[in-house]
Amino acid sequence: MKNKIYELAGRIKEEIKNRKNYYAKGEKKIAVSNLKVLFAASIAVVLLLLTFILLTPFIIKGWEPTVYHISFIPAASVFCMVISVYYIKKREHASGRTVMFLCALFMVLLTGFCILIDTAGTPNAPATFSDVAFIILPAVFIMPLRGAYSLIAVMEALYIAAIEIFKENQVGQYDIFSSIVALACSVIVSNLITHLRMRDYSIQTKYKVLSMVDALTGTLNKQSTLDTLEEYLERRTGDTNCALVLIDLDNFKGANDTLGHAAGDIILQHMGSILRETFRQTDIIGRFGGDEFIVLVKDAVSEEMIRGKCASIGKRLAECTGADVGKPISCSFGAVVVTGRQGILKSVFQQADAALYEAKRGGKAKCIIHMYENYSRTDGQQT
């Protein structure tokens, strides 16, 4: 029994942790998704409100809209126009905080008018809309459940207070009970939907990572490496430096032919592991070709540091391959250190490639490091 309690507590802690990661890492996508839902929901509310007001007199004889029904129309319409303008302008670049505020405002607006209609507007009739709002609204938007339910709890308290003020006692008791049931159902539905959203996000993230990673070495594949390098160099500021390192295994083709493809795969796997262990998680590590690797080392980079890491990589690779495939494999390094300037990927890569060629031509198992020389984008002249 005690073990089961610990297991349950562990699962709850893991779920809370996963939710925090989900909201933190998916903030931009969540904001865009919430804005799209909010845009559609605000239009739907106006259309449904008009439809109900027009059709209800034919369904309930003698029914007439109250002042709360009537005032709901302009309030919902104004909100809908505001959301429409914001959606058109910020559709793909919405601020997470702004969207979250607008979602909360929508929940307050909709629930508030439902409460007024179900209490002050119809004191002698059972509630119709408030319970639906309590169930649906927390599940519609992607937002931390603590925030959503804090808001709904406040609205529930106001609803009960309004029932006590406006409703007949017999009808009010049933309304309070049904609202509590609706709130309990809402907790279950919202948690289930949030869990499913997190699972879908996790699956999407997993497949995205798999599409970016080279399966054999565990490093980025060529296209993902190029995309990540270009993004980093474009955003890099002038007061930081970095180094691009190209690595080529010496005589890999000969080793692959004589020792077999299985041995070749082992060599590449060792290289991938060594690179991931040598450099930081924030650095960019990729397999650029058959036996070529590329690393971009970020921030606080010096020639001495790069040279030291390259020496360590070469030593470890020779030891691992000598032990596992019976033949020590060496590697050559060509690096370019970029300091204080904006590096263009094509130019940085070409200069690192030239350094690698120099290392290979100089007898292999060498490390050649150059300082980056900036060229203008337009005329190709050195600056």
Image (cartoon, grey):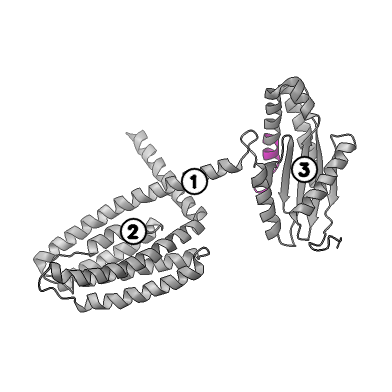
Residue type of the residue flagged with mark 3: Leu
Residue 204's disc number: 1
Q: Earlier in the sequence, mark 3 or mark 2?
A: 2
Q: Is residue 129 left or right of residue 42?
A: left
Is 198 within the magenta?
A: no
Name the residue: 71% across, 26% down: 264
Does 307 appear above or below 376?
above
Q: Which residue is mark 2?
A: 138
Does 92 appear above or below 327?
below
Residue 227's disc number: none
Q: Earlier in the sequence, mark 2 or mark 1?
A: 2
At label 3, counting other C-alpha atoms closer than 10 Å, the crowd grade (few under 14, some 14-19, many 20 or more) is many
**Viewer-proximal residue, 309 or 81?**
81
Give the structural element (helix, strand or loop) at label 1.
helix
Residue type of the residue flagged with mark 1: Gln
Q: Is residue 312 left or right of residue 96?
A: right
